[in-house]
Amino acid sequence: MKTYRYLSLIILVLAVTGYRLTAQRDIADLRLLLSSEAWEEALGETHRLLKTDGVNARVWYKGGIAHRNLMRPDSSLYYFQKAAGLDPDNYRFTMALAAAYTGMNRFTPAKELYAGLILRDSLRLEPYIQLASLFLRENQPGKALEIYRELSARDTGNYIYYKNIATCYRRMRRDPETIRYLKMAHERNREDLSINTMLAELYIITKNYREGLEISERGLEVDRTNQELLFYSGFFNYALGHHLQAIVRLAHAENAGNESLRVIQFLGVCYYLTGNYEKARDYLEEAIESGLRDHRVFNYLGKIYRKMGDYEISEYYFLNSLAVLSPSVSSLTDTYLQLIETYKSSGDTGMIVEAYKSALVYDSDNPYLHYGLAYTLDTRLKDREAALVHYIRFSEIAGPFLEADADLPSLLDHCNARIRRIREDMFFENK
């Protein structure tokens, strides 16, 4: 009888060991599929394994990775929820779930997960970093600032924390503190030239042209071909009255590939101020052709053509200078937006559309106008094709405004979803 029990126990141990070895091989095979980016095959293997072992958190986690890489956020979220539910103490599973929530702009559960991880293990830094990032995305720089200050106290040599503290202060419109922490970041890392460009932009705002020139030149010591810093050096030289030095830097910026409107504009201005009127004319007219509407540039051109004896064109540019002085584009846009609200109240959809179109004549690169027009055409007039044009334009130009406006990411998500849906509907209707 004892021999029978002994043999039974051995058989049970061998069976369990065999099962574990098989499970480990299955996970290894699944990991290999994921590492080779065979996402569909990995999902097929995941489904097979879950049929016999539906409580294996690692399999659910691997399936979530596959779905995530196949751009299936809902399925990825579901799989990560299952993995974290089965093994709530697993750090990787919880981090993946929080990232999935973040990717779907569901910030509240993501923040709760990161906060829980911090309570569980306060030594891990990544949950702090991700939580602070979410606060910034929700336009809560004060809360993000608290986290970054704690992180900087833990690691005083990490320049990224000082750079992020500066970002928080920038969002809070506290320029002195922003500059202070950017300087601290720069002291710890002279190679990150984005710090130099951020400081340069702030020195333009605060009209601290000497320090602006200094930080620009320090950056150029690291990279003599940096297009942005070449512009900033040129601008600060111009602002300090060093017009010939400004031309040298701005010309280098242009030759390095920076053909931005502001490079062209200030090259033209500096050539004018140094008496090279033909070059000034060429650059200033190029700036106007690129969309610049600055009364000073029109004035310079008016004076240039008067010096050249072409009084008709001189008059034309002076008249344009008067036209752009009053009213300003921002005033026009604000007035149109107020008018649109009146039309909304009265329910006059046709006039809403006309008001948006009129505002875009003056402010053609305003993302809010394009979105408002697209949404009105889409939801009120059911004119999908016309709406699509403005949804696409909004998606093209909204990027630079995302950090400054917490509402824009959700508008961009809706916009991209509508672009996909409208295109799909039009495709199937035309088949």
Image (cartoon, grey):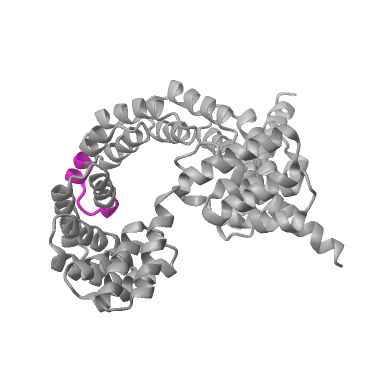
Whether 188 is among the magenta residues is yes
Most common secondary structure along the magenta stretch: helix
Residue 418, percent across and down?
71, 50
Side (left or right) of 262 relative to 45: left
Whether 169 is among the magenta residues is no
Residue at point 42%, 25% (across, down): 121
Nearer to us in this view, 344 or 81: 344
Name above or below for residue 389 compared with residue 344: below
Q: Residue farthest to the top?
A: 119
* Residue stretch rendered in magenta on the structure: 183-194
**Quadrant of the drawing holding the C terminus:** bottom right
Question: From this viewpoint, is residue 28 visible?
Answer: no
Name above or below for residue 297 compared with residue 410: below
Side (left or right) of 181 relative to 11: left
Residue at point 73%, 36% (across, down): 54
Task: Name which quarter of the figure residue 38 lies in.
Answer: bottom right
Residue 360, percent across and down?
57, 53
Question: From this viewpoint, is residue 135 visible?
Answer: yes
Residue 363, percent across and down?
52, 53
Nearer to us in this view, 150 or 92: 150
